Amino acid sequence: MLDQLVAHAVQLSSLPRLARIRQQPHEVQARLLRGLLGRAQGTEWGRRYGFSEKMTPAEFARRVPANTYEQLYPELEKVLRGQPDVLWPGRPQWFAKSSGTTNARSKFIPVTAEALYHCHYRAGRDMLALSTHLYPRERLLAGKTLSLGGAHAPNPFRPHEPASRVGDVSAVIMAQLPGWAERLRTPPLKLALLEEWEEKIERIARHALRQDVRVLAGVPTWMVVLLRRVVALAGADNITQVWPQLRLFLHGAVAFGPYRELFRQLIPDARMRYLEIYNASEGYFALQDEPEGEDLLLLLDHGIYYEFLPADQWAAPDPRPVPLAEVELHRPYALVISTNAGLWRYVVGDTVRFTSLAPYRVRITGRTKHFLNAFGEEVVIETAEAAVAAASHATGLLVRDFTAAPVWFTADSATSRGGHEWVIEFADAPVAPDLARFGAVLDATLCALNSDYAAKRHRSLALAPPRVRAVPGGTFEAWLAHQGKLGGQHKVPRLLNSREVLEAVLRAASVAARQA
């Protein structure tokens, strides 16, 4: 069968490389850095810092400062405007536009040909190889992979160059897929790249009704919306009645734990499998290579050289990342990358912890600016999502989305305490006792997972019990739409030390309630 031949071909290409990543991580990374430095030595950036293939990792770290997006932006703007040979040889035409979760502005990340083919596409083939290797009997490639992504548009910095485009990284990838890969996926590009999100969901749902979908790929938040629409259009009870051969969901962008039960209801088939990918605008970083675990194998030969910034360095004026060989288990690190798209010692903003050093596997824990620490409680996204998942499981209340922020002390009360407010959109409106139970389990789980939180919650002396507020269905979608971030890889910040987002979500909830 043709699908089995394709599966065999991608396995022959990918599986030996993944074995080398596991067995020779430092050699792989050292060779990759030499290649990056040699390739970029003639660029403006390379001449500034004396790049060459002979430069050692220690010299590289000593000469080149760590950079945030804001610090690197003057150089990135030159690239956006078409100046050649600034950060990487040539003149990139494509740019991944992210929602700019580190600040209010959008971020524009160059997607060079090398980054596209040797990072994103290579990792995609690796995931394809792993999937077909892990589940050979399912014949995943005999049907279609339904991928849900964003859109792209002309580059606003080059209005007279139609070939230069910006968009969600998923749209950048789909728009340039090789022909053989395009034949494996659905919907067709004219639907996949539609800009108006509500029209896109409707038209993709109607098209997908007639397809043999065996794999899903996308962000859980938006995949739920699509699957529900498909089920409604088909007049079915669940998605297995529409796509009986559906067997795998490749998910990313948000933690899957809070969505797991929701997908079990939508896809009540014991043969359904779930694998996580870690793909961002800046690169494809990791993938789940062991189906029974939740850890992600760090991809070390995909055009990205890695360093890691310890938590005590996140706010330092001159941050000092450590190399891969010096990371420790279970400590929080921020990703620092140097890539074949010209990002040099770039602080991504995502945080991870290592769960294994042989091979190097990580779990995503959040972002350097997305956590709750208004009172010394140090709640990170990984812990928050685990607590929400535990509360959902204990109460049967299925969570669609949530955000949390501090409740500040009030000056007019001697007994005032700080706390957290959690705004949660459930699949169905909860009754008061269930909502109270949800809050209690959420609180207890946070105490069990986080000693700092538990200490502040002891006898409610420093932190009051969490306030949990249910909002109407469609609230978070309405907030995203108002921000111009509907669809694609856009998502609501889970945790912030300010109430700006939470208050805006509550305003959206008021509008949704009036319209109900």
Image: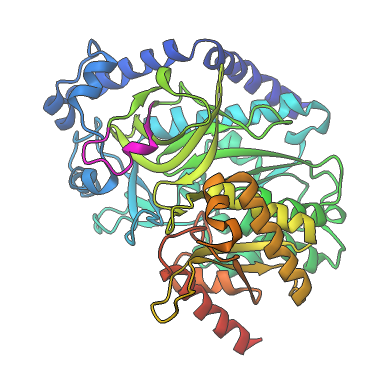
Q: Position of residue 158 (x, y in %)?
A: 24, 54
> Farthest residue toward the left?
48
Instruction: Give the residue at x 53% y 35%.
Output: 178
Instruction: Give the residue at x 58% y 29%.
Output: 125
Kindly tell me whether residue 111 is visible in this rendering. Answer: no
Instruction: Give the residue at x 14% y 31%.
Output: 44
From the image, which quarter does the C terminus lie in? Answer: bottom right
Q: Position of residue 414 (x, y in %)?
A: 44, 76
Q: Nearer the viewer, residue 151 or 219?
A: 219
- First to last magenta residue range: 306-319
Q: Is residue 183 above or below residue 137?
A: below
Q: Position of residue 131 (x, y in %)?
A: 70, 30
Residue 119 position by quadrant: top left
* Horizontal side of residue 463 vs 77, given as left or right: right
* Horizontal side of residue 380 vs 281, given as left or right: right
* Horizontal side of residue 142 vs 37, given as left or right: right
